[in-house]
Image (cartoon, rainbow, N blue to C red):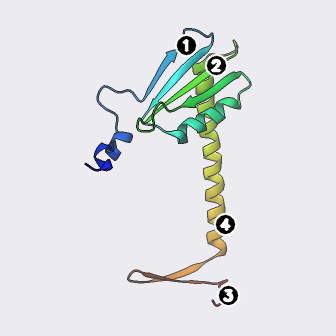
Amino acid sequence: MSSADNRPEPSEFHRLDDDEEKVEYEKDQKLTNCGVLNLNKEDHTLGNFMRAHLLMDKRVLFAGYRIPHPLTPLVRLKVRTTAETSPLGAINDAIKNAVNEVDKIENSFTKALEEFESQNVRTEENYGDLMVTDSKDDAGF
């Protein structure tokens, strides 16, 4: 028996089962203004991104996440807030801020790419698998 026999199928890490929800919220019964957001089929990429954006909010007292097991694609994001907002309100605000930030990055990248392409006009000839590129500011190498 090889170690690969126990490895989950790659599709198990992104396809939801019929009985699974993508996002589930549990209110913490012990702490006020505290809850846990379960993000199914997610990993550190989204967990750390959400945690970082939540901590930018002064109304958030605590934001942290954990992945219960490396083979289980589940992020448990715990959030505790001041009385000014609820954990879900802070999460919604963090999502809006994150989307705005990603939009700014996309716009900045697109603008820089367009500037680069306009300054570096290229002619390309395709020879099978070999791509030959001539650039106007090529140093002749």
Marked residue nearer the N-terminal end (2 or 4): 2
Marked residue nearer the N-terminal end (1 or 3): 1
Spatial separation of the CA atoms under disc 2 and disc 3: 58 Å
Helix, strand or loop under label 2:
strand
**In the foreground, 119 or 59:** 59
Residue 78: x and y in percent read 57, 23
Q: Which residue is mark 4?
A: 115
Helix, strand or loop under label 4:
helix
Residue 30: x and y in percent read 58, 9
Spatial separation of the CA atoms under disc 1 and disc 4: 50 Å
Q: Residues within 10 Å of mark 3 (few under 14, many from 20)?
A: few
Spatial separation of the CA atoms under disc 3 and disc 4: 20 Å
Q: Amino acid at mark 2?
A: Arg
Q: Residues within 10 Å of mark 4 (few under 14, many from 20)?
A: few
Marked residue nearer the N-terminal end (3 or 4): 4
Q: Residue at x 59, y 26 (%)?
A: 91
Spatial separation of the CA atoms under disc 1 and disc 2: 9 Å
Instruction: Tell me whether the residue at label 3 lies in contact with that at label 4, contact meaning CB atoms closer than 8 angstroms.
Output: no
Q: Amino acid at mark 1?
A: Asp
Q: Residue at x 41, y 30 (%)?
A: 22
Q: Amino acid at mark 4?
A: Glu
Q: Which residue is mark 2?
A: 80
Is label 1 or label 3 in front? 1
Is label 1 or label 4 in front? 1
Q: Which residue is mark 3?
A: 139
Residue 103: x and y in percent read 61, 45
